[in-house]
Amino acid sequence: MSGPLDGTVVTELAGIGPTPFAGMVLSDLGARVIRLDRPPGAVPPIGSGRHDLMARGRESIAVDLKSSDGVEIALRCAAASDVLVEGLRPGVTERLGVGPANCLARNPSLVYGRMTGWGQDGPMAGMAGHDIDYIAVSGALHPIGPPTTPVPPLNLVGDYGGGGMLLVVGVLAALLHARATGEGQVVDAAMVDGSALLTTSHHGLMAEGWWVPMRESNLLDGGAPFYSVYATADERHVAVGALEPQFFAALLEGLGLTREDVGEQADRSMWPAMRRVFAATFKQRTRDEWAELFEGTDACVAPVLSLAEAPGHPHIRARGTFVEIDGVTQPGPAPRFGATPASARKPPSEPGADTDSILADLGYSQQEIGKLRASGVVF
């Protein structure tokens, strides 16, 4: 057995952002994921296939879903799958003939996972958008960044945290239900909903009066000098997260400071002066010197590593957090399982790399496969 989802079959309608991320996670966890790619030239390439890391672990069939024969292939895939995931705008799969009603008619126990930005309904459901738009409307973007302007947190919050990861959670929950009852269902995962969900604790803090709507004025948004990022002598950075009193004490000890130097931790009136002292102190050594000094302590100080540096950190190496597949270093599967280890099993497939073998599994003869290729239905 390879991963806890070994034996589970997933059909993925190719897309961008959160849907391929969800497909990658499901594949890492052991599912067989069959990606229905669009015909060559239908979508501009984003780099080479070898570096399309979120496409790892999948089999690929390139099929034209605008043809009736292509639709039949997709419906056969749905009939042979436990899960189907798609990330098209609301109504698109219905127009193509591969919507929930079509697929559930073929497979009543199918989990049909839908990933959109705005959701399947509501006044904005049909509008275009990207991660930054969804987290803007959900309230997740506003608290991030300096006082002057919010800063996009890459596309981690909408696409992946509030999008792809919540799609995986929804699919797995619905899969448990389907296996217990034989009843499939539609999972409506929206980035606007998921990114809002990620702010739950902050709404609680706001209701309690502990969170104010000004950036860098709160405990976790960089407002607290003991939960912030500081430049070092080599113009690199360290991250400080010394929230609890005992961790704050360890921070002061490592910095060679006393409470008389910085004031009381909980006294907000002292925070501006405390920040100046911390900033000046951290400027006295390089990032790696501070990392070595705080190594093994509970001061909650860590070096800010670049994407290129992270795989080489001793703890990251010891954990095997990154793996190498086909000569490309990339994050490995997470989380870890004691009895059914997950694994990133194969590098990304070029669109259509597995067309013939997938069609054969679906019951097509070699003669039928030849006709489908000749007519431009598959590639």
Image: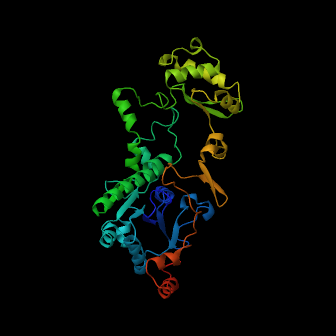
Q: Find residue 185 and report its image quarter.
A: bottom left
The residue lying toward the viewer, choosing from 275 and 369, is 369
Q: Is residue 320 visible?
A: yes
The residue lying toward the viewer, choosing from 10 and 258, is 10
Instruction: Give left or right: position of 132 versus 254.
Output: left
The residue lying toward the viewer, choosing from 265 and 276, is 265
Instruction: Give left or right: position of 231 versus 105.
Output: right
Instruction: Give left or right: position of 62 versus 77.
Output: right
- Give the x, y percent position of residue 200: 37, 38
- Establish if 161 lies above or below 360: above
- Give the x, y percent position of residue 227: 53, 28
- Establish if 140 lies above or below 173: above
Q: Is residue 119 visible?
A: no
Q: Looking at the image, which residue is at 55% across and 70% down? A: 351
Q: Find residue 92 and report its image quarter.
A: bottom left
Q: Looking at the image, which residue is at 61% across and 50% down? A: 322
